[in-house]
Each structure stands twice: as C-alpha cells, then as structure tokens.
Image: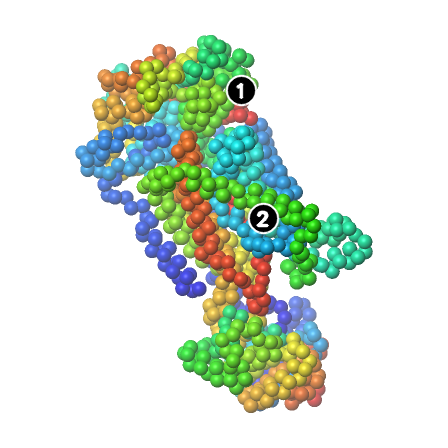
C-alpha cells in the first residue's frame, strides 16, 4: 500500500478537517487578515479616520516621492541586502569547514548554532551594544566609536542570520552525493573545480532559499533597528513605530506599512517558490568527513570556529560579562517592584501564549495535511512583521487596545506557526502504514491520534513549542503597541532602561537582558531537551534544520 | 505527553483570573511623563489624607504619553494626567481625551492652559552652554541664532528630535515663532550644514553629548533651570554653576504644564483632589528642585538654588490653536530639512 | 466468509479496478498476484476499509460492511515494512489491539507475553522494535495481528523486504499459524513461488480485472 493516507478520504474525514481548521482559521482571519485589510484601507485612502491623528492625507506613492521616506526604504532594503552578501560570503566557507571536517566537539558546535534562534532580539541588540556600543568592551579597547554608523545594525543582523546560513549550508552539503564528487576528482578536477562544478549546483538552491529568509528578517526586523539604528540608520519598521507612537501620524504610517507588506510579501513568495523546488532530503551517500590534515586545514578550521565565536557567541557572552561587571549591588538593586512585575508579566504572558499557540498549531497542522492552501496559510504570520500586525490590530479594534485577550491572542498568532510547521513536517514524515495498522487493529481516528500520532510527533511538537516559547518571551513590537503601561514585560523594560542615559541604567539593562536570556534558554532546554533523536524507523538521526525553523525578528 | 499538555493548559487557564487587571477599588491612576518626580513623603501624605492608593504610570515623553492616552481612549489607562503642556493641549482636546472643564483656581496673573487643565508649573526651553568648553574655545558666545550658523561655531549644538522629544519640539516652535517659518527652516538647514547633532531625547543630548558631561557639544537645547540643577546635584559645594542659559531671540520657549482629568476614567473625586494637591503649596515648593520647573501658582516662594536659573525676560509663546493645527506639518518639514 | 462484489476504483482518471468479484472462505488463503501498479494494494485497502470504492460492496458473513470504519471491521492488515510502532516496546506493540478491545493494560500485557512466548520472542518483550531483525519484526507484526482474533487477515507483500532464505522459512511458519487460526486470508504478492507455497487458490489482477489462476 503505497502513498500517503490522503487517498483514503471519507466524508467524515472531511468534516473533521473543517472542524480542525475552524479555530486556526478564525484566529488568522480575525487577528491577521482583517487587521491587514484595515491597514490597507488606511494606506490606500491615506486617512486614518482617527480623531486626534495628524491631519492631512497621504498619497500611496508618498514613500517614493518623499526624500526622507525614500531614504528610509532604500536603506532598509540596502541593509538587508548587505547582510545577505556578508552572510553568504562568511557563511559558505564556514559551512564547508563544518560539513567536511571531523573534529572533536563538532556535534556540540552544530547544536550551538541553533542558539541565536532563541535569543530575543532586544537581548541581541544589547549584546552588540555591550561589545561595540559607547561603553562597549571592544570599542573601548580599540578606541573607536561606532555610534551613528550602520555597522552596529549590520553586526546585529549578522549575529542572527549567519548561523542560519551556516546551518543551511551544512545541511545542503550533506546532500551532495559523494560518488559524484569522487567521479569528478577521478576525472581530473581539483578540489576547487569539484566544488564549483558538482557541489555548488547542488547546494545553491538551499543557500538561495536561506538567503531569502535572511533578507526577510533583516528587512522586516524591528528590535535590532530600533536600538542599534540610531537616528540615521533606522529602518522603515522603526519609522512606522515612531510615526504611530510619537507623532500619531496614522495615515503616513499606514502607507508605509502597506508598502512594507507588499515588499515582504514578494520576498516571501520568492522563498516559497524556491522551497517548492527543493526536493525532500533524499538519502544519498554523503561525502565523508575527515579530520583536518595539514597545517592549512587546521588553520582553516580554527579560523572558522573563531569567526563563529566572534560573531555569534561573543555578543551573548559580552552581556553576561557586563552584567557581571555591574556588580552585586546592581543585581540586588535591580529587582524592584517594577522589575518583579515585568518578570511576572513576561512569564505569564509567555505561558498563556504558548498554550494557545500549541493548540492552534496542532489543529492547523492536522488540517493542513490534506490541503495545500492551509499549508501556505501557515506562512502568513511570517510574512507580516510584528509591527504591521500590531498596528493593524490597533486600527481595527480600537476598543480592544490595552486589553489582555487581544494582547495574548496577538502573541499566540505570531508564535503558533512554529508549532504548525514543525508538526506539519513531522506529520509528513510519519509513515502512513503506522496509522493504517493502528486503524485496522481497532483504533478509531481519535484513538490513533492520541496513541500513535502524537507520541511519535513528540519531538516535532517540542521543537515547535520551543521556538514558540522563545518567540513569546522575546516579544517586543506587539507589547509596545498594544500593552498597558502596567503590563510592561522584561523586553519593554529593557528598552525603557536603554532610553535612560547613564551608566547605572545601562548596567541595569545588562542585568535584565541576562535574566531574559536565561529564561529563553531555560524554556528552550525544558521543552527541547537535547536527547538523541530517532526517526520513525528507529535510526538515530542528526537533526536537520527544517524549513519549519523560522523566527521572528 | 498528554499530561504535560494538560498541565500547560491548566496553568494557563489558572493564570487568567490573576491576570485581569485587578484594580483595587480605591486606586487612583495618574499618567505622567518620565520627568515627573515628587518627594515620596508628599505623595504618601496625599494617599493618607484621601484614603486612596496612588498609582503613578510613567508614559515616556510627554508627546508619547499623550499618544498613549489617545490610542487607548476606549479603555482609559489612567484617571488623571499630568504633563500635558501648551504644545500638546490642542491635540489633547481635539482627540477628546480630557474632561472638558475643571474647577479653576488659577489667578489671573498666571499662565493658563484652557479650561481642561489646571496649570501646575512652567519652564523655559532654551540653550545651555558649558562655561569651561566655551572658555577653552576662545570664542565669544553667539548673540543671535543666525550667528550660530557661522563656521566658527561648527559642531557646537546638539538638539533632541522634535518628533520624539517635547523639548526638541518646543525649541523648534520657538525658532518658528521667533524667526518666522521660512527663515526658521532656512536656519535649520544652515545648522545642519554646520554640524548640528540630532538625538532621540533630551536625556541623550544632555547626559551623553553635552560638553558638561564629557560629550563633544558645548551647546545643548535644555531648560533655563538646568544650571540650577547642576549646582544642586554637584558633589562638591559650588557657588557658581558650570553651565548657564543662553537666551537668544527665537531660541526661548515658555512651556506651561498642567494636570487634568482623563475622559472616561474613574475615581472622579480623588482625581479632583489630586488636581488641588498638585497646586498646593508643598508641592509647588517641592517641584522646583524635583522636576526643575517654576511653580505656576503665583506667590510661591522660589527655592534658594533657583537663583542660578534666572527666568528669561523674552520668550516665545505661540497660541495653542496655531500649534495644534500646524505642529505636525512643521515637524514633518523639519525632518525633511534636517534629517533626510 | 469474505466477499467482494463488483468492486470498482479509479486512480485519477484511469480505471484501476473494474468490477472485481472475489470470495474467500473461512480458513482459506487466497493469493492475489499481479504486476506492480496493478491495484493489488488498493484492493486490500478497500477491503480493510481504508478506502471507499467507487462502486461495489464488501460483505462478510452475509453482512454488508462497505460502510463500516476500519476499526470496526476487525480485519487485520500486515505490511511490507512491518509497521510496528517505534515508540512502543515489542510487548506493547502486540498488546495494542487488545487495549483497543477495552482489555485492561496488565491483562493485555500478560496475554501478549504469552503470545510472544508462542512465537519464541518472549526474550524481546521489553526491547524497542528497531533492535529486532526484519524477520523477527514481521513475526511480531503477525503476533500483533493474530492476538486480536481478527475476522479476516490481509497481507500486503509481507516478505518482500526480507532475504530469500528468510522468506522461505517464514512462509512455512506463517502458513501454519494462519491455518491454525482459521480466518479467511488474502495474500498479496508478486512472487509465484510464495503464492504456491502458502495459498490454496490464486487469482491474478491485470488490467483491472481478476482472473483465476489455480
């Protein structure tokens, strides 16, 4: 009996599908599509219909006509593009080294590459400041001032995205057929030519698709640009936030948000098209890894590890170091009532959002099994930036602003795609025969789900939940827009501390960032304890970065 | 596995009742901007006298604070608000976030903010200079704004962004009011060419970039009372302030702040008592050295240290309606001229 | 007695099964031969209730069970890739169907242990399924199927994934056990020798039609 279970569609199954899809569909419609439509309306008409908003109407082409805004948009595109180039230039060699060389601790390094995924954007921004900011460890030592330069933002972008490219590269290189490479070498190709003619065509689609993601994150990113961009090098997302929060220029902000939506949508579409062309990982005989031989190869390995450490590990360590330097007094003093309240808020919002996100994600994944449309729908929250979503919600439900259900629902909608995609990927890889065997042994569809499907998908579920938890913990943009002052979370508190000048505030920010980092790490470990995974045939599997591994900027 | 899911769901549901904002029945929420400060004993005294708990909610910069009120109009996050000044009152009234009228106790000689706000304090946004670095430069202080655009004064001034800082906004309004709109923007363009630095807020400008605090800029847009604050907070006893105000024509703005009731808020009585409290003698005295503003209530004695902060004789005070109708456009134009 | 009456099924636009009629008596093993892609597996799926036919009906002991869900038919299905549950031990795999029949866990496990002993696999009871060889796994699958006392047994190329010599020895064992159990059995295979060794009767499926072989 070949083929998946899709052909065994009975009418009752269709009904179940509809019921399963109901909750996620409602969530997407009410919390994503409707606000975006409202935003689009506001953008097209250029008016806000909002009493008290700045008067005047804005044309749809304003971002291109107005010099200041055009600069912002072009810079946003440029910084994303530059990051792509840098990530590619650095990432490919790093990936090659990690994929081809065998060395002690290799698995650990590969696991650690996942770490930037769980670092909240605000913590990462602080990490960059800890290294290169006005009182940074490295900038002070080198005597340079990077304030008001674009390098801070680019460095922050690289911190998040280099690891993604490296991971994608390692996985891609693992798909290269060793026999083909051997054949090429025996036909007289040098290692470089073999790479260029055999390996590169095989890995290019993977890398291109991951670069699409890099571009998307950098372009639609908010937290990093807000803290590191400064006056001159902030991105359009920051501009939208400033327009709404500081100037109440709803009309202008809507136009910008609409353009952002269009641009990110195009890139996301490109990503989806690239993904379709990527075949599911087939079991080829991968090129064997060998320990580095000769001085040159050892140097290459050390250089690669050094570069990874410098870009991806150092910022996090710098925060911890700065927090340590802040001294015991700061640590004790920082836990005042405000911080305790923020900590409590972070914990309870994240927990509730995680529960809701898990429910939505599982339902969506089950509904998406038989429908390409639903699979694509899971992408939707990734396509829009959190700022756009929050802004749309603000416009659509003015009466619900600063209400807990909306805040949590927004959290959940932004976090649940991780669960959905992880579960969907897991469901895909579940052999249909197992479910059929269970059915013929007497288990109803529900019993099959509880007794067979769910236990087998536990790793995928935990994985999705880990990312969802990290997203919720580090959530920033939505909280800025939709929260009440008394519901400040750790992230908004850190942001406020950053707004106060002076050494004391900065030290407090570092301490709080360390705490947030610890929480994210804890959530990640709790939910995704690094046990050796086995695939459904029982073979130990080296976990691969799946297309479901996405993150919000 | 199922158990874990259930416990997760259960905890989430259990947390829900705890999470609804449990307003104590007797809690007065007051929204303030980030510069608000009053001695804790005074606030405690208010709480004791009126048998109510005071929840001070800091809303960021004054403009930001007002926007928050506007955005959360349907479910107000506060009952009273302090810190709306003459630059923002027009917007506040247009958005309908304030109760339209308050019992007024202001005397005729005081600056007013209209019927919705009771004036609490006033101040002057002006330029401050660091005496030490001016002396080192060997240059005389500029006597007009126009002189500031000369090459000799290149890279001297740091200003907060009017879009994100009410201090910067006030200064922009002063230049427009004093020089005329087109001349003012011409001046800003020249200043941009002459090394003007723009930062997000007053704190950055003052504490990071001002020469007094080891920054590189001898001139900063600040308050007439800042020199007095320097004396007050200095570690050693000094008789003269290391900074002083530079009051140029078109560079001084009078800012009047007030307290009002948020429309749709609760605790009406307590809020009205709070309004009286803010205008009471002890608070008017205390706010001078806490918030570094001049007391609005006539007849209040000036604090000793305020002699280092003489009130500027001339200042700009454009009408609130003008600010309300043109302010946003001016900020947009400023952004184009200076930041693009 | 298992009856298929006028079963038709399409695959996309093309007709896969056309008006299939088949009867399998109690205790009879019928082999279903045919080239790959001929629809043998589809036919088994229809019998098991995992697919609904375009037209036709499935009868058992004089009752029309076409509308019955798979879990209600009590037809056990065995696969080429064994389909043992990797998250359960060997013992729990065998006990799976008993638990679905509402037997208590400890009773189910005890009976499963007895069954495994019958198969000579009691020593593997606590092991995970991937520790067993292919032949052992398929035998566990048979144990898992037989312990539920199914009304019919459906085998989809059960030995294709195993070595030649293993196939020969397993054939004999399976035939003995199935005949001892005595339910109608449909064996799908592409191997004529296997069909001769195990089945009493064989039919061939070609071009959507069933023709008796021997």
The chain letter under disc 1 is B
Which percent across, then down, holds residue A182?
75, 58
- Residue B264 drawn above or below residue A522: above
Is residue B113 in view from this perspective?
A: no
Q: Nearer the viewer, residue C86 or C44?
A: C86
Q: Is residue B34 above or below residue A522?
A: above
Q: Could you tell me which residue is drawn at 47 percent across and 62 percent down?
A: A19
Label 1's element?
Answer: loop
User: What x and y, as percent, mark residue C102?
Assistant: 42, 78
Residue in view at x 65 percent, y 71 percent: C10
**Coordinates of residue A133 in the picture (x, y in percent):** 50, 33
Does residue A337 lie above or below A435 as drawn? Answer: above
Which quarter of the image is occupied by the N terminus of chain B?
bottom left
Front residue of C197/A432: it is C197
> Does A23 sit left or right of A83 as displayed?
left
Query: Dot 2 lies on which element?
Result: helix
Residue at the spot of label 1: B195
Classify mark 2: residues with Cα within 10 Å, few (<14), some (14-19) or many (20+). Answer: many
Query: Residue sitting at 56 percent across and 45 percent down?
Result: A309
Subunit bearing disc 2? A
Q: Quadrant of residue A264?
A: top right
Residue farthest left in this picture? B49
Q: Is residue A452 visible?
A: yes
- Residue beneath label 2, please? A164
Question: Picture quarter containing residue B73?
Answer: top left
Q: Quadrant of the C terminus of chain B?
A: top right
């Amino acid at each position: 009996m070949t083929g998946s279970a899709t052909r065994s569609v009975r009418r009752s199954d269709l009904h179940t599908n509809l019921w399963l899809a109901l909750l996620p569909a409602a969530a997407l419609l009410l919390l994503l599509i409707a606000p975006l439509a409202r935003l689009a309306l506001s953008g097209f008409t250029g008016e806000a219909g909002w009493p008290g908003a700045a008067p005047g109407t804005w044309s749809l082409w304003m971002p291109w006509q107005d010099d200041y805004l055009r600069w912002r948009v072009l810079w946003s595109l440029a910084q994303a593009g530059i990051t792509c180039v840098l990530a590619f230039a650095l990432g490919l060699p790093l990936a090659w080294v990690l994929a081809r060389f065998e060395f002690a601790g290799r698995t650990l390094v590969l696991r650690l590459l996942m770490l930037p995924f769980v670092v909240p954007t605000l913590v990462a921004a602080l990490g960059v400041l800890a290294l290169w900011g006005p009182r940074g460890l490295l900038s002070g030592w080198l005597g340079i001032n990077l304030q008001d330069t674009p390098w801070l933002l680019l460095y922050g972008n690289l911190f998040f995205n280099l690891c993604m490219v490296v991971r994608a590269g390692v996985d891609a290189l693992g798909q290269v057929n060793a026999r083909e490479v051997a054949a090429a070498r025996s036909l007289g190709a040098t290692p470089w030519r073999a790479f260029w003619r055999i390996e590169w065509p095989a890995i290019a689609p993977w890398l291109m698709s991951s670069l699409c993601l890099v571009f998307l994150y950098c372009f639609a990113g908010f937290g990093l640009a807000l803290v590191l961009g400064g006056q001159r090098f902030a991105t359009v997302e920051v501009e939208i936030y400033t327009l709404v929060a500081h100037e109440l220029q709803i009309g202008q902000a809507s136009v910008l948000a609409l353009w952002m939506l269009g641009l990110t949508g195009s890139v996301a579409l490109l990503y989806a098209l690239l993904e379709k062309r990527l075949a599911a990982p087939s079991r080829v005989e991968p090129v064997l890894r060998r320990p580095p031989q000769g001085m040159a190869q050892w140097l290459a390995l050390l250089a690669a590890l050094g570069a990874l450490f410098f870009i991806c590990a150092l910022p996090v360590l710098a925060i911890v170091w700065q927090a340590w330097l802040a001294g015991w007094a700061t640590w004790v003093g920082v836990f005042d009532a405000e911080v305790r309240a923020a900590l409590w808020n972070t914990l309870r919002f994240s927990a509730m959002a995680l529960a809701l996100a898990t429910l939505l994600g599982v339902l969506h994944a089950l509904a998406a099994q038989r429908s390409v449309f639903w699979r694509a729908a899971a992408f939707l929250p990734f396509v829009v930036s959190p700022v756009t979503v929050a802004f749309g919600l603000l416009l659509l439900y003015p009466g619900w602003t600063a209400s807990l259900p909306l805040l949590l629902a927004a959290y959940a909608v932004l976090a649940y795609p991780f669960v959905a995609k992880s579960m969907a990927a897991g469901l895909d890889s579940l052999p249909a025969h197992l479910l059929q065997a269970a059915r013929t042994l007497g288990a109803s569809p529900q019993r099959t789900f509880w007794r067979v499907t769910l236990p087998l998908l536990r790793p995928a579920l935990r994985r999705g939940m880990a990312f969802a938890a990290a997203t919720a913990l580090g959530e920033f943009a939505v909280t800025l827009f939709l929260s009440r002052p008394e519901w400040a979370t750790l992230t908004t508190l850190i942001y406020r501390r950053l707004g106060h000048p002076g050494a004391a505030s900065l030290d407090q920010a570092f301490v709080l960032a360390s705490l947030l980092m610890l929480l994210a790490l804890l959530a990640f470990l709790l939910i995704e304890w690094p046990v050796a995974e086995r695939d459904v045939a029982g073979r130990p599997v080296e976990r691969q970065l799946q297309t479901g591994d996405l993150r919000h900027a | 596995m199922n158990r874990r899911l259930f416990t997760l769901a259960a905890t989430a549901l259990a947390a829900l009742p705890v999470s609804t904002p449990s307003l104590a029945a007797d809690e007065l929420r007051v929204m303030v901007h980030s510069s608000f400060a009053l001695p804790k004993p005074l606030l405690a005294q208010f709480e004791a006298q009126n048998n109510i708990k005071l929840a001070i909610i800091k809303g960021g910069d004054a403009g930001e604070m007002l926007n928050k009120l506007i955005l959360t109009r349907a479910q107000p996050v506060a009952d009273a608000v302090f810190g709306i000044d003459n630059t923002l009152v027009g917007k506040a009234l247009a958005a309908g976030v304030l109760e339209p009228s308050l019992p007024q106790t202001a005397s005729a000689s005081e600056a007013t903010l209209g019927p919705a706000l009771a004036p609490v304090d006033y101040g002057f946004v002006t330029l401050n200079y660091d005496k030490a670095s001016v002396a080192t430069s060997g240059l005389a202080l500029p006597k007009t704004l126009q002189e500031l655009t000369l090459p000799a004064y290149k890279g001297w001034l740091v200003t907060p962004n009017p879009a994100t800082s009410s201090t910067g906004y006030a200064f922009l309004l002063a230049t427009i009011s004093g020089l005329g709109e087109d001349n003012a923007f011409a001046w800003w363009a020249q200043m941009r060419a002459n090394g003007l630095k723009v930062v997000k807020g007053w704190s950055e400008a003052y504490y990071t970039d001002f020469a007094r605090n080891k920054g590189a800029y001898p001139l900063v847009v600040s308050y007439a009372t800042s020199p007095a604050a320097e004396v007050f907070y200095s570690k050693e006893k000094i008789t003269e302030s290391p900074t002083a105000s530079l009051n140029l024509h078109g560079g001084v703005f009078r800012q009047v702040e007030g307290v009002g009731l948020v429309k749709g808020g609760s605790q009406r009585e307590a809020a009205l008592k709070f309004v009286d409290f803010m205008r009471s003698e002890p608070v008017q005295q205390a706010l001078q050295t806490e918030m570094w503003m001049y007391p609005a209530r006539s007849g209040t004695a000036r604090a000793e240290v305020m002699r280092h902060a003489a009130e500027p004789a001339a200042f700009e005070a454009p009408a609130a309606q003008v600010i309300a109708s043109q302010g946003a456009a001016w900020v947009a134009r400023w952004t184009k001229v200076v930041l693009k | 007695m298992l009856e298929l009456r006028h079963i038709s099924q399409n695959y996309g636009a093309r007709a896969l099964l056309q008006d299939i009629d088949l009867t399998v008596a109690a205790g009879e093993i019928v082999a279903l031969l045919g080239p790959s892609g001929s629809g043998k597996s589809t036919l088994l799926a229809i019998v098991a209730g995992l697919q609904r036919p375009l037209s036709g009906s499935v009868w058992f002991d004089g009752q029309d069970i076409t509308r019955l869900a798979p879990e209600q038919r009590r037809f056990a299905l065995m696969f080429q890739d064994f389909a043992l549950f990797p998250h359960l031990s060997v013992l729990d795999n065998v006990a799976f169907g008993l638990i679905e029949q509402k037997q208590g866990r400890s009773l189910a496990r005890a009976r499963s242990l007895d069954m495994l002993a019958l198969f000579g696999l009691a020593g593997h009871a606590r092991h995970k399924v991937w520790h067993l060889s292919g032949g052992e796994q398929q035998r566990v699958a048979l144990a898992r199927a037989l312990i539920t006392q199914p009304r019919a047994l459906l085998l989809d190329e059960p030995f294709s994934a195993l070595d030649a010599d293993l196939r020969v020895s397993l054939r004999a064992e399976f035939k003995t056990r199935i005949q001892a159990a005595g339910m109608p059995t449909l064996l799908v295979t592409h191997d004529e020798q296997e069909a001769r060794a195990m089945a009493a009767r064989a039919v061939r499926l070609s071009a959507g039609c069933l023709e008796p072989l021997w």
